Image (cartoon, helix red, strand yellow):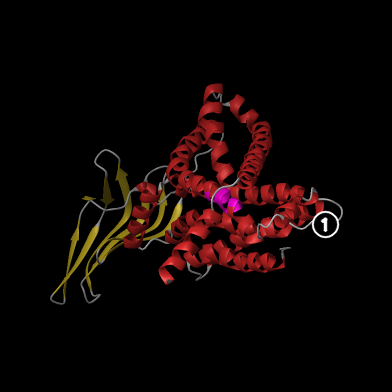
């Protein structure tokens, strides 16, 4: 008897979740408004960006084909996905408020559909957007960012992106550590270079010191000049000096002079592999890449949270039209972005875990979403 009841309950649930005409209407409204907002905002962004950079393009004789296909066709998806959760929120607030003003929400609820059931098409549309954002961010945009950044280096930036790096500490092998006082990516040369090797108990076994080290792009090796090797064997120290010594390490010049946008040029697998390498090296850049990795999951998930907040906030018919709802929606969405930036900076400059930093805003806004959902008209 219980099995029969369970089957009936399951059948009733599946029947409730079946796509109906009103669901198609809401999904079409949601996606249509979202992509309209994307096109509108990105058109404005492209116009302003082009007006700002046209002098640089003309000064450096940038081909118009490269401007269109190498730069702007890669510029648009990058910024569109970056602010997609904001566009989702604005879209939901806008078209749901219009539905409320036109008493469509009241008609839907009076027809017997519960508020919870009405959220079903919203979440289906949000799932489509979240999957698109996740796919583009992890597999498509990293390659397009490489093309865009290469174009910027050629035709926009007056100088290269690379800058000198100081106080470099890296673990290159197990119990083997490298230190450089400074490194110049222009001359591929480092100052005050040392390699220290320790045993399993943490005691120093050998140390190579050199006032200068250079990178040979042909052999892909580091060359230490005027080096000194200090070896400790049976409590005795042996010193060896020389003019030139080639070393093979797991680090390359690009590891010292990464552009801030470099993290956005990696696919998910490349990012994970690079994080493992940074852990081995003991790099201070590890937090930057961990934040990016967790952001790529937290951002698509935020689409669902902001959708719930948007529907709960704008489903009530208010005096004065939709202006108040849009104003509150913009304030909440910008506060979310601001809070996300604060959390990432606390992680970079402090001891906040990168994963926690990226998910704290989502957890806080889940609470806000549930409160607004409870207060929404049923």
Residue 238 on image: x %, y %: 16, 67
- Report whether 225 appears left or right of 77: left
Residue 36: tell me if it is visible: yes
- For the C terminus, the image quarter is bottom right
Q: Residue furthest front?
A: 1
Residue 244: tell me if it is visible: no
| Other residues around mark 1 within 10 Å, as few (<14) / some (14–19) / many (≥20) | some
Residue 365 in the image: above or below residue 141: below
Residue 108 in the image: above or below residue 350: above
**Magenta span: helix, strand or loop, mainly?**
helix
Q: Is residue 125 magenta?
A: yes
- For the N terminus, the image quarter is bottom left
Residue 234 in the image: above or below residue 25: below
Query: Residue at image x 62%, y 44%?
Result: 21
Residue 220 on image: x %, y %: 26, 43
- Report whether 141 appears left or right of 22: left
Of 159 and 358, which appears nearest the observer? 358
What span is in magenta?
121-127
- Secondary structure of the residue carrying tag 1 is loop
């Amino acid at each position: 008897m219980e099995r029969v009841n369970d089957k009936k309950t399951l059948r009733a649930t599946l029947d409730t979740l079946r796509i109906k005409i009103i669901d198609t209407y809401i999904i079409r409204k949601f996606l249509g408004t979202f992509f309209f907002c994307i096109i509108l905002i990105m058109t404005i962004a492209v116009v302003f960006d082009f007006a700002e950079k046209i002098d640089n393009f003309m000064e450096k004789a940038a081909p118009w084909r490269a401007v269109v296909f190498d730069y702007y066709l890669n510029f648009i998806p990058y910024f569109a996905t970056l602010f997609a959760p904001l566009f989702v929120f604005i879209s939901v607030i806008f078209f749901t408020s219009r539905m409320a003003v036109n008493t469509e929400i009241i008609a839907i609820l009076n027809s017997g559909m519960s508020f919870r059931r009405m959220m079903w098409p919203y979440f289906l549309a949000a799932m489509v957007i979240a999957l698109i954002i996740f796919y583009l961010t992890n597999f498509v945009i990293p390659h397009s960012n490489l093309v865009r950044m290469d174009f910027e280096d050629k035709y926009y930036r007056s100088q290269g992106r690379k800058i000198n790096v100081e106080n470099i500490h890296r673990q290159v092998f197990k119990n083997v550590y490298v230190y450089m006082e400074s490194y110049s990516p222009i001359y591929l040369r480092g100052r005050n270079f040392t390699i220290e090797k320790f045993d399993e108990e943490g005691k120093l076994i050998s140390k190579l010191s050199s006032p200068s080290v250079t990178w040979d792009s042909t052999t892909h090796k580091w060359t230490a000049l005027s080096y000194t090797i200090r070896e400790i064997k049976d409590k005795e120290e042996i010193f060896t000096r020389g003019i030139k010594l080639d070393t093979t390490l797991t680090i390359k010049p690009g590891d010292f002079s990464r552009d801030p946008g470099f993290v956005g040029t990696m696919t998910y697998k490349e990012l994970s592999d690079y994080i493992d390498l940074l852990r081995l090296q003991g790099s201070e850049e590890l937090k930057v890449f961990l934040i990016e990795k967790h952001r790529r999951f937290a951002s698509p998930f935020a689409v669902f949270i902001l959708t719930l907040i948007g529907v709960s906030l704008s489903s009530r018919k208010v005096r004065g039209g939709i202006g108040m709802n849009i104003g509150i929606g913009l304030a909440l969405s910008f506060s979310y972005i601001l809070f996300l930036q604060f959390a990432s900076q606390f992680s970079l400059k402090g001891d906040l875990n990168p994963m926690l930093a990226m998910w704290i805003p989502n957890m806080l806004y889940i609470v806000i979403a549930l409160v607004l959902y409870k207060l929404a008209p049923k």
